[in-house]
Image (spheres, grey):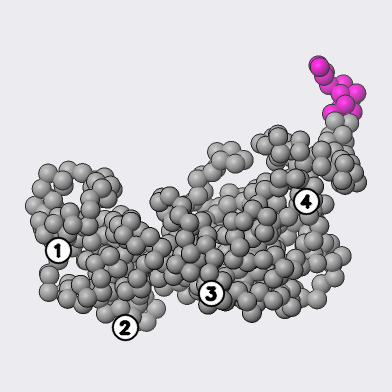
Amino acid sequence: MKRARQDDPAEPTKVSRTKTTKSYSHPFNVRPLANLLLNETYDDQVRSDGLGVFSELPDLLLLYILKKLSAKELCSCSSISKIFLIFCSTDQLWEVLCFEKFGFTMPVSSPCWKYTFLGSSFQDQLDRTTLNLPQIYSDHLYFDWFYSQVDITPWIGHDNIERRSGLTIDQFNEEYNLPNKPVILTDLSTPWPCKETWTKANLNSRGRRVLAGITSLPKVNTKFQHYYTSMFHLAPPYTHSLFIDPNNGQDKITRPEEYSVPPYFTQDLFSVLSQRPQFRWLLIGAARSGSCFHQDPNFTAAWNTSLYGRKKFVLFPGDIVPPGIEQTGPDDFVPPTIVMDWFVKHYSTLKRGSFLEAVISPGETIFVPSGWWHTVLNLDETIAVTQNFVDEYNLENVCSYLETTKPELYAQFMGGLQTQKPDFYEKATKKKLSEWDEMMNEDDQGGAFFL
Ligand SMILES: O=C(O)CCC(=O)C(=O)O
Ligand SMILES: [Fe+2]
């Protein structure tokens, strides 16, 4: 969730004299919890007096209760005390109310949810500096706001992923696809019609409807134009993916003919499946939104081309679980839920060079090989296109993943390969035979082997 703009006079941001350190003063005088350690004179009584019996509750629980209130009730609670005013002004409470009130026809009136709900004139009347608000310490109240403000420029300019152009298909396969190594290709999208046609204005003018979802609210069928406006005015933390698939009717905003699959990625072994997993997406994201750490579905590889805006990628090889991720099984991991959260908490603690990172600019394509962990932060408003694919180079990874975790899909895939692409069926099954042979050979050399 990001709302406040740097130039909003109601959201003051102090810039220190040293220029390099910026101090972030929250509009309602909230500080991160850790700062409490620095305040020896802090008087806890302020919180107890302000919240009464509710001061016994942890902040998260109190916010959970306040989330049940209507706008009118929140406004009434705001007048109980200054501390209640601070809690009741938290933007996450107003996000839900805004979507209930406006759906995806949000008026573009304010960079924060509360004032969008109440109308911009209300914001004009409120001068928080005269309220003399007490300081309060809470991560739950502070960080949403902080993520919308924090300087992200130190995260730019450390690119260590190779950039290449003019590669032949053989060169690409030999240098990147076979070794499963990321690369940025700078010359692939030049002839694509979508470079002209997928502008914000043009996509909006196509007047289509999409099934759109936001946070925990149910998906709604809305005009793409409304969805787009709401999303960019009040940016949610995630990149939104809309399927590019003329057959399932989900996304008639774009058509596959508006771009062409770059020659390195045209092998598409999942095409043997009659019902294949979704594999191509239009990605739209506001600045500071993104995709949290993940490995791509079914261990497929992917290419991702930005058409508008810059995208920061951070990648780790499949056998190194990135910091901040708890992995308990192959398909079972808990990523940070907000991309900005990962960048703030983990990115700057990493040793430079111990992972891969780069910013891709419009027109550039990144190859994300099979199994690589990646997270993406949109530095600007972005429109991108991505496809996942299975080719002969990642076939083995995909097969061993499917065999252990999705046996039904595995059986369909093997069946499809056997009838439609027998060479690849052999390739997919040959590896297993040789493993079997190895075991038998080991057995020959003296090990006991029971069937
Ligand atoms: O937000 C992005 O561009 C990354 C998308 C991605 O990694 C994916 O769709 O798997
Ligand atoms: Fe991905």
Mark 1 residue CB less than 8 A from any atom of ligand 1: no
Alpha-carbon span between mark 2 and mark 1: 26 Å
Out of 441 and 127, give the one closest to the viewer: 127
Residue denoted by label 2:
17
Which numbered disc, 2 or 1, marks the residue that appears first in the sequence?
Answer: 2
Going by the numbered disc 1, the residue's amino acid type is Pro
Q: Is residue 431 left or right of residue 146?
A: right
Q: Are marks 2 and 1 in contact (CB under 8 Å)?
A: no
Per the rendered image, the range of residues in magenta is 439-451
Residue 161: x %, y % from top left: 67, 68
Which numbered disc, 1 or 3, marks the residue that appears first in the sequence?
Answer: 1
What label does residue 205 carry, if any?
Answer: 3
What label does residue 407 carry, if any?
Answer: none
Residue denoted by label 1:
134
Determine whether the residue tagged by mark 4 lies in a helix, strand or loop. helix
Residue 7's place in the image compared with 81, above or below, is: below
Residue at 21% of width from left, 44% of height from top?
57
Which numbered disc, 4 or 3, marks the residue that appears first in the sequence?
Answer: 3
Residue denoted by label 4:
271
Determine whether the residue tagged by mark 1 lies in a helix, strand or loop. loop
Residue 372's place in the image compared with 206, above or below, is: above
Alpha-carbon span between mark 4 and mark 3: 32 Å
Which numbered disc, 3 or 2, marks the residue that appears first in the sequence?
Answer: 2
Alpha-carbon span between mark 3 and mark 2: 47 Å
Judge depth for marks 3 and 2 and give the one in front: 3
Going by the numbered disc 2, the residue's amino acid type is Arg
Q: Is residue 337 left or right of residue 165?
A: left
